[in-house]
Image (spheres, rainbow, N blue to C red):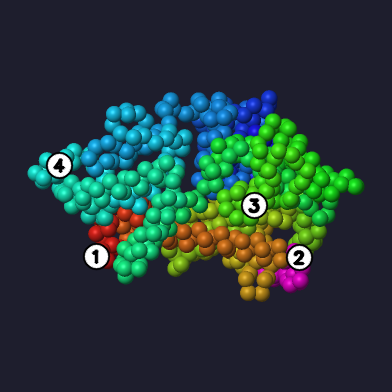
Amino acid sequence: MQFQRYSNEEYLKLPHKPGIYKFLDQTETIIYVGKAKDLRKRVASYFTKKNLDNRKTQRLVSEIKQIEFVLVSSEFDALLLENNLIKENQPRYNILLKDDKSFPSICITNERFPRIYSTRKIDHKKGEYFGPYTSVKAMNGVIDLIRKLHKIRTCKYNLSEENVRKKKFKVCLEYHIGNCLGPCEGLQKEEDYQKDIDEAKKILKGKIGVVGKSYKEKMQKASSNLKFELAQNFKEKLDLLEKFQIKTLIVNQKITNTDVFTMTHSAKDKSLFINYMRIENGSIVNSETIEAKKKLDETNSEVFRFSIFDLRKKYKSENPFILTNEKVEGWENVEITVPQIGDKKKLIDLSYKNALYYQKEKLTRTNIQPNHEILKNLKEDLRLQSLPVHIECFDNSNIQGTNPVASMVCFKNGKPSKSDYRKFNIKTVVGPDDFASMKEIVGRRYGHLKRENMPYPNLIVIDGGKGQLSAACEALKELKIYGQIPIIGIAKKLEEIYFPEDSIPIYISKKSTSLKLIQQLRDEAHRFAITFHRQKRSKQSITSALDGITGIGPKTRDELMREFGSIERLKQSSENDLVNLIGKTRAFQIFEAIKKGDL
């Protein structure tokens, strides 16, 4: 299976998008398959010093010679496609790092008031099993959907008629938070409970449309009888089903034995970019994007048709159905369609997305050139010795001295290099002292570069006037590198440019491209610092609010902070989400605090 390919030294060119990545060795054998919400960040993490402390990762990274990837629509799609590829290719590092457990299944027990749970042990005497699931996350998503739609018990009580009649059990927290209707105390009839179980089975069998139709009919009936609360309840269930249905297009059992081809082309040259996806049993099993060149007398349609023929031959595909975004003629025993709506159209969109990205990357690699003219103007305006190919800009942010932070942004060849951006928490300064804060972060940044023997930038830009610039220069003097790196400050009001030890600023023409580049650096550093400051304030606000709740300690508080980020998002969370995250007892404390207005 071939994706878009880079060498192991070009991983920073990967996009910040969800997808699947594969590592290949020098023999072009797949040695590892992984998924990512952000491809560039995930792949880059393998090459950091932190991960290289792991011997298995060290060995894996040492063997990587090529990196291939394919874009998908969501992290959920990436999860499902990853499992398909691991199962098909059996990369040796996936096998080494994976436990020997069997794939899990979902069990509906055959007891009175059946339970629904996940298990890896199959015992058909206990109940009916659905699966196995290659993705635990996908399986948990199905269970979560069922529990949101129906009130299924989670306790392990033996709810025989005699036990219920003798009042052996009491309702638990699940009843109080609305996740269970209390069959343990006889508060729910067995026949009503069984109806929920029957609908759950339909969902597990993939008959979501049947369940949705049933909810729609019940909603309309309740609305006709003026039972609007009941109608709203069925509408919410219908919405949940629809969201679950559109959550993934990687696996759709209705679409099988199908080839997907999409084409895009550049108006400036004779290149066509064609993506191919092969669908088997509802899953993508092959994907490749190619570039095809037109000859003088060829049309786009002819090149597209020939490319389809070549790709099908390469992958030995005899699928009887082909989906395309352009009409293609001249095929026998093959049904070719151009879908306009539905899941087939979503597959076309996904394929086209990969073709467009490949085209963009190809053109970028072809036309990539440093912005020499702007950098040359900047060199002349600032009277620099060398071209400022690498520029770093600093800014700090605080509100009356609270949550002080700072940022450093990096531009290379006149463009942002976001992988080199850095955030700083101010550690040594008390109160609102911008000058001392600037001295601290500049000292920390270039002290680190000096210790690691890393290259310095060609220019340092300080967001601020003479005071901030002087503070930054003091830091460079203490490191004994003052004079080795050109440094300037830019004051906001009149866009004055200050040089060290010179009280008179220079003014660059407002129309100058070099001033615009400095302004872009300054604005980006300010944005980055402000964003970091807001995040820190938000975390502090949720921390202080949770400190007063009984039973919520630092560990739970940090877990809630990582998951929700703010009090408002915490309040909007569902009972299931909170119980699954921190347990029933602590979740109950949180909901009590919300009810009392303490949170």
Question: What's the amino acid at mark 3?
Answer: Pro
In front of the other: 482 or 452: 452
Question: What's the amino acid at mark 2?
Answer: Thr
Main SS class of the magenta portion in the image: loop
Q: Does 364 lie within the magenta span?
A: no
Q: Earlier in the sequence, mark 1 or mark 2?
A: 2
Q: Residues within 10 Å of mark 4 (few under 14, many from 20)?
A: few
Name the outermost residue toward the front. 333
Q: Which range of residues does the magenta coloring cover?
A: 501-515
Left or right? Give the position of 535 relative to 224: right
Q: Which mark is residue 219?
A: none
Nearest-to-viewer mark from 1 and 4: 4
Alpha carbon of mark 1 to alpha carbon of mark 2: how far? Answer: 58 Å
Q: Are marks 1 and 4 in contact (CB under 8 Å)?
A: no
Question: What's the amino acid at mark 4?
Answer: Glu
Q: Earlier in the sequence, mark 1 or mark 4?
A: 4
x 31%, y 49%: residue: 196
Alpha carbon of mark 1 to alpha carbon of mark 4: how far? Answer: 39 Å
